[in-house]
Structures are given as structure tokens and as C-alpha cells.
Image (spheres, rainbow, N blue to C red):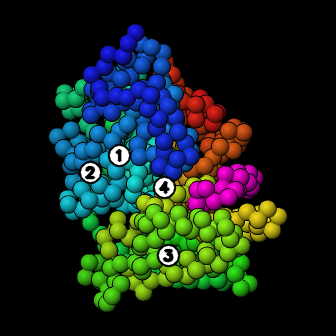
Amino acid sequence: MELNLNVESRSRYTWRNATGNVEVTPLQFFFPENEKEIADIIKDAEKRGLRVRAVGSGHSYSEVAVSKDYLISMKKLDKVSGTPNDCLLEPWKNRHLVNISAGVILKELNIKLDELGLALPNMGAVDFQTVSGALLTGTHGTGINKPAFPDIVQSIKMVGTGGELIQVEPANGMTDPLKHGNKSALRLIKNDDVFQSAVLSIGGMGVVYEVTMEVKPTFWMREKREILKWSELRKKLVNGEFMRFVENTDFVAFRANPYEVKGDHSCAVVQQHIVGEHEKPKGWGATKRNILSSSLGNIEYLIESTIRRMNLRPQNTPNTIDQAIRSTKDIAFFGKSHQVLYQSGLAVIRHGLSAEFAFEAKADIIVNVLENVFKAAKQNAEIGKLYQSSHVPVRFVDASKALLSSAYGKKTVYIDIPLLHTTIGDYELLERYQDMMIKLGGVPHWGKMNNKLYENIEFIRQKYPRWQTWADIRNELDPKGTFLNDFIIKMGLS
């Protein structure tokens, strides 16, 4: 049975993620323009007993996007528009709701929202992901009282088994069922468990083609960075001062050098406050981060030369990281929210790998985990001359309602281990850190390196107390296994 679909597609096509550490050659790679074409792809796959998977920009380092059968690119679904209120329940009609197609890149979304006088309430450190990719892997951002990405979403539209169009919302969600039934061909599901499963489904319940987010009017932020020694920051963590600061500041994160330089670890504490537009500071640098932090991450050859230097002279790595941390100190940085929350560069993403872990946001846990990281970094360097090639970012986020969020039910601290890809020992180091962090109780991020979880199914089930509810809903929505993928199977979630 030959392929007979009126959808742009390619055979013998190898898809790679942005960093190049994951690749797959599916039977067919599709570029649909709308939900009808997605439905046709799904129906054809089910006739052939094949599976379907959607991919975005390939920002994830894990194997979450891999499909050997039909793979769908979402890049042509790129619309952003206000949400019509003709089917909304009355309390929702004056809220800031926006319909966003799944293939919209966050950078483009920020531009579109800005044109509408709106902004995301939170975002990750980068803006290269598609909306669906960021959502379905649990992107979080920072701010202990700010929502993770799945918790900004109010409604999901997806194509399910048999090509059925489905709209999923919480039980008290925005859509009036009576008005919806008269105006839409989508089956409306208003159920808390179904919504909180589908909103972070790892692509396992259908192909999400549009989401509705609740956003905010445009707001401005001011960023300040402070360089501290770990001994100073540790003291503030232990006595409770730092966590009070985290609770009472809009957005907080910090970065730590895993290596001692001159007897201590350097840390850069980043605080970001929501301010009025009239509070723009004066003087050079007020609206731009310093030249090193704003340009280095976007210049390809600088990253490549850094990797070469680290491979040739690995013993210089601690000082290189220390200098990089100290160079990020700013007099002041003021801008619109998406400009300030953006923290990295495109070249870094193409040359980066990362394993990230979620813990309950408690000071004693942060101190214990970081000091274990410092100890492991020292041991890896002393015994194997293997050095991790970046600082350790620490970020915070509010408790999530999504059943498979690593922040489910608790305010969470994320501790990241990023490396520059192709530095010597990169994969080996990340596997060693995964083993260590899992033993400490850290829950790996679905979109980062997490292959060690394949060996820890019981750990996953312990850390996600409602995984069985998620799996039951996935099986109910996908009885033919069309959206089941190897990643979900390896994680023991099927």
C-alpha cells in the first residue's frame, strides 16, 4: 500500500535535534499545515499499524521526540490570535487569553504578544523551543511563586486516535459546553485529571495543534546580579535569609562554579523585579547586559574555540568558569519581561547538553545537593582529568498541577548540570551526575539527558504519585497505541 496523502512529506530523511546528540530516520517525515492534514496522517498510520510522533525545534536533549514510524514537523502551524469570547463562560470573557498554534517558536510568540500589549507570565531561559515542545516536556522558567509552562495553559486542542479533534480543559475551564456544542466540531472534555495529564503528555495522547494560554499585560523588569562566595551564600541558605529572599522576589536564580578557585566557589545571584516602565535606569548599559554575557552565547566560533581550549587544557576549566561568572555582573539591566527572562544564546544551545533535576525547594536540600556536585566535580577532575564545562544553574518554580511535572504538588528547585557538547567525557560525566542526583532523590527533567531513568522505573513511579492515573488516561485516549512511543515505554509509563 503506497503512501497516498496530500500532505508534504519526505522519505529517507534523518531528523536531528538542535545539539545533534539525538537522531532518527522515520519511515516518513511530514509537514502538515493544519489539523485536517494531521488527522489524515493519523488515520493513514492507523490503517498501517504505525505510530505517530510530533516534533518541534528539537531543543530537548532526551529521546522524547524519537519515532521510527511517522514523524510530524509542527513548524507550519504558526498562528497567534486572540481567543474569541463567543463560547467562553462569563468569568473568562475579560481575561487575557491567546490561541497559539503548536509550531510557534517562543521568540516569535513573544514578538506577537508584545504587539498585542501582552506577555507570558514566565518562560524558560531560552526562546528557541516551539510552544508544544516546551509544554509537553515541562519547561519551567524561574520564580518560586510563578507558574511552570504547563500551568499557564487553559485549553488544549489535539488530534486523537481516528483523526478525532478533541478540546481538553479543567472541569471549571473557560468554555461553555452548551455554546461549544453548537459551534464546534471538536469533542470537548472538561475533566481535571484528563487535562492535567494531557497538558504534559510527552506527546503520548494525541498531536497537540493549538493551546490557549492565559497571559498578562506587557510588563517591565529590572535585573541585578550579585557575585558571592559559596561560603557566603551557604550561610544565607542555612539561616533562612536566602529562601526568604527567594519567596519575596519576583524571579530569582543563581549560578555556581562547581570548582574552587582561590579557596571558594564563585556564585552569581540573579534577581529580577517587576517594575513600572517609568523606573528605567539611566546610563550606559541600562538596557543591555554586559558585552560578554550578551554576545558570547550567540557567536558560534567563540563557543567552538572554548570547547577546543577546554579539551587541550582541561586544567584551566575552573578559572574559565570563574571568569565567566564574574563577567556577568551588571550595573543594571532593564527591559520588557521576555528580554530579561531570556538568559542564553543560540550558539550555546547548538553546542550544549544538560541533565537537570528537581528537588523540593528547601535550603538544606540545596546545600546538600550542591556540595555533592562540588565533591563529584573535584573527584572527576582529580581521578580522570574530566571537567564539566559550565557553571551549575539553580532555579525555582511554583508547585505544578500537571501530573507528570517534576514540580507536581510542591514548590521546586531545579539544579542543572550543563556541559558543552564534544568536550572530552561529556556523556560519561552526565551519566555519573544522573546516577548521583537520582540517589539524592532528584527527579530528572523530561527534556534533558535522562537515559539513566530507563533503569529506574520504580523510582519514576515513586516520584510521580499519580503516574497510574496518567497512564490510564493515556490508554483511554489512545486505545490503538498510535501515540505510544519508545520513550514512554522505557520510562515505565505505558
In terms of sequence position, does the residue under pointer 3 or pointer 2 come before the other? 2
- Tell me the distance, in whole angstroms, between the alpha carbons under discs 4 and 3: 24 Å
Which type of secondary structure does the marked residue at label 3 adopt?
A: strand
Q: Which of marks 3 and 2 is in front?
A: 3
| Mark 3 residue crowding within 10 angstroms, few (<14) / some (14–19) / many (20+) | some
- According to the picture, the residue beneath numbered tag 2 turns out to be 97
Secondary structure of the residue carrying numbered label 1? strand
Note whether 340 is above or below 9 in the view shown.
below
Please name the amino acid that badge 4 sits on: Arg
Q: What residue type is labelled 2?
A: Leu
Callout 1–callout 2 Cβ contact below 8 Å: yes
Q: In this view, does 247 lie to the left or right of 317?
A: left
Whole-percent x and y of residue 246? 53, 73
Q: Is 66 rendered above or below residue 2?
A: below
Quadrant location of the C terminus in the rendered image: top right
Q: Which amino acid does label 3 sit on?
A: Val
- The kind of secondary structure element at disc 4 is helix
- Magenta-tinted stretch: 418-442
Q: Which of marks 3 and 1 is in front?
A: 3
Residue indicated by mark 4: 350
Disc 2 element: strand
Which of disc 2 and disc 1 is earlier in sequence? 2
How packed is label 1: few (under 14 Cα within 10 Å), some, or many (20 or more)? many
Give the residue number, with chain letter if any, for mark 1.
Answer: 154
Question: What residue is shown at x 61% (from left), y 56% (from top)?
Answer: 422
Considering depth in this image, is 17 or 478 the residue closer to the camera? 17
> What residue is pinned by disc 3?
270
